[in-house]
Image (cartoon, rainbow, N blue to C red):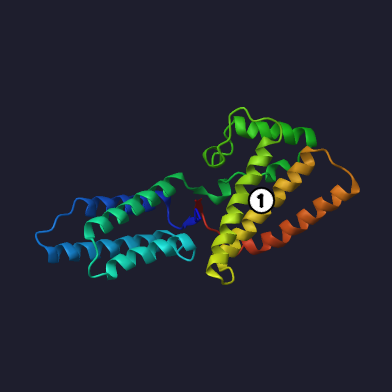
Amino acid sequence: MKEIYIIIKDKAHTLKRIEGLCSKYHTKTAINEQQRKRHFKSYCHDAVTVINDCFETSLLGAKRTINKINEYSKKDNVNIQAASLDIFNILINLKCLVESSVPIQDLPSCRRLIGLSPEDAVFKANEFVKNNDIRAGIHILSLESNVTDTQYIEAVTTFYSNYLHELKDEINFKRIAPNQIEQFLLDKFNIELEYCRLAQLKAGNNIAKDIKGLADIAKESIEKREQRLIALNKTLLSI
């Protein structure tokens, strides 16, 4: 699993905390083995503190990371050099995640296509990509600059389908009901997929009664799920 991470503090603040931790312990030296062990335990403690402070720890990715670092700290015969390097790599990976993270509200969405005519929906989809309007999606979705027609809609659909699949895997792995943040993400991803479905209908110029029925079902699903989103609003999302 790729695992989903939510950053709950300001991006600049989180990066500063991680970079400061890497700098502090990567260059720290000890005069003897006893001091070396103390430094390592402090490193583990500070790393866990940063993750607890800056990331949503109810999600599987952050939980696994914290557990791994805590296991290193508990071992009496741990290889400190190897473990320290592993923790350093963990922090660097988290730093990369934070750097590429974007506000959830800025993630790509087909919401803006819904109110347009079928012809305008296709045109707008192309314009969004050309103008880099889906700034969160350009690198995440690996879109080409020469997308045509409904490729934007298809790419956004794939984007949220992948997120939803990963999230469901994480929830199934824990074998317990979704917690508050997981339910928030389930609703968010499903809502965006419903918008994709509506955009596909719009772009396809489908006006048959059965198509209208599908559109009505999608709209009802969106309305129900959006009521639950009001209670919780996380800012940054990264895989």
**Residue extending farthest left:** 31
SS for callout 1: helix
Q: In the image, residue 1 lies at what x, y percent?
A: 51, 55
Relative depth, front residue between 54 and 36: 36
**Residue extending farthest top:** 146
Occupied quadrant, residue 38: bottom left
Residue name at image x 59 percent, y 50 percent = 162
Residue name at image x 85 percent, y 48 percent = 211
Q: In the image, residue 83 lies at what x, y percent?
A: 27, 58
Q: Can you say whether 185 is above or below 206 in the image?
A: below
Residue beneath label 1, please?
192
Tell whether 37 sits left or right of 46. Answer: left
Relative depth, front residue between 73 and 27: 73
Q: Can you say whether 115 is above or below 225 in the image?
A: above
Residue name at image x 74 percent, y 36 percent = 121
Occupied quadrant, residue 169: bottom right
Tell whether 207 sits left or right of 171. Answer: right
Tell whether 153 sits left or right of 136. Answer: right
Amino acid carrying mark 1 in the image: Glu
Q: In the image, residue 222 lies at what x, y percent?
A: 72, 56
Q: In the image, residue 201 lies at what x, y percent?
A: 79, 43
Q: Residues within 10 Å of mark 1 (few under 14, many from 20)?
A: many
